[in-house]
Amino acid sequence: MVITDEAVIGIEEDPQMDGTEFQVSLERLRGCIGSCDNDEIENVVTDLDLLTIEVERWPDGFFDGLEGLLRDPYFIGLAKSWTLFYFIANNWEQISEPEQERLREVLGQAFDKCGDWMGPFVIGEILGDRYADETTLAILEHLAKTANLLARQLLPHTLEHLAKATNRESLRSQAIQQLQGLRKSDSKEVRDEAFTSLAKLGISPE
């Protein structure tokens, strides 16, 4: 049997399907740590969006690579690192439940370590919308005591999202209680943000 060139071409494996392009993207992102190239981070995330459209599932090991980057203080300290959190949020269906729980820890650790205010903003929305439970409230309570001022200003926004996401009145009440506590912060910026979030929830600040 003679195999024609056309037949060989027809069965050639798409490199995107075996995960090669995803691994190359991870290497490009790792390279940004040394180069501090924020434009390249945005370029890679754009490419990853297109690659994800082409596959049913992320290849094995890809989430592990993302997690490693988001645990790296030098990577998340870059101004555009938040775009990788945004990419994950937009592809939530790709993440298994065990991976989601690992990610919650990563989000809590990265909240006040990002190189741009968009970091805690995006992370806060993920925590509030995707992890509306007591564990997240405990993380936010800890951050209210330990995070830097810029990140603490985003905590009310996170609590607002959590309060809106939950169907449990008891959890909503706990989120509102934390917001009311932030109204007593020593930072005017934090107090003002808490006031705004409470108003959006229809609550008169105490």
Image (cartoon, rainbow, N blue to C red):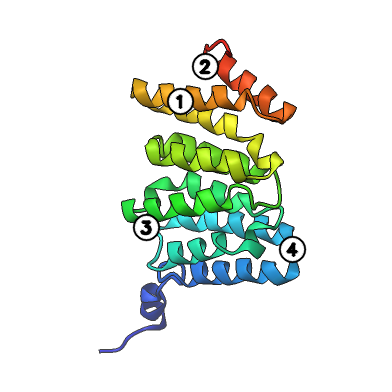
Among the two numbered marks 4 and 2 on one chain, the one whose residue lies closer to the N terminus? 4
Could you tell me which secondary element the residue under label 2 belongs to?
loop
Q: Quadrant of residue 174?
A: top left
Among the two numbered marks 4 and 3 on one chain, the one whose residue lies closer to the N terminus? 4
Name the amino acid type tagged 3. Answer: Arg
Among the two numbered marks 3 and 2 on one chain, the one whose residue lies closer to the N terminus? 3
Real-space Cα separation, disc 4 to disc 2, in angstroms: 39 Å
Q: Identify whether 156 is placed above or below 100.
A: above
Q: Are marks 2 and 1 in contact (CB under 8 Å)?
A: yes
Closer to us: mark 4 or mark 1? 1
Real-space Cα separation, disc 4 to disc 1, in angstroms: 37 Å
Q: Which residue is the site of mark 3?
A: 57
- The answer to whether residue 81 is visible is yes
Closer to us: mark 4 or mark 3? 4
Name the amino acid type tagged 2. Answer: Leu
Q: Which residue is the site of mark 4?
A: 37
Could you tell me which secondary element the residue under label 3 belongs to?
loop
Position of residue 204 in the picture relative to residue 104 (left or right): right
Residue pictured at 40% horizontal, 41% vertical: 135
Quick one: which residue is furthest to the bottom in this view?
1
Could you tell me which secondary element the residue under label 1 belongs to?
helix
Quarter of the image with the C terminus is: top right
Name the amino acid type tagged 4. Answer: Asp
Q: Which residue is the site of mark 2?
A: 201
Real-space Cα separation, disc 3 to disc 2, in angstroms: 37 Å
Q: Residues within 10 Å of mark 4 (few under 14, many from 20)?
A: some
Q: Quadrant of residue 118?
A: top right
Real-space Cα separation, disc 2 to disc 1, in angstroms: 8 Å
Q: Position of residue 6 (x, y in %)?
A: 40, 77
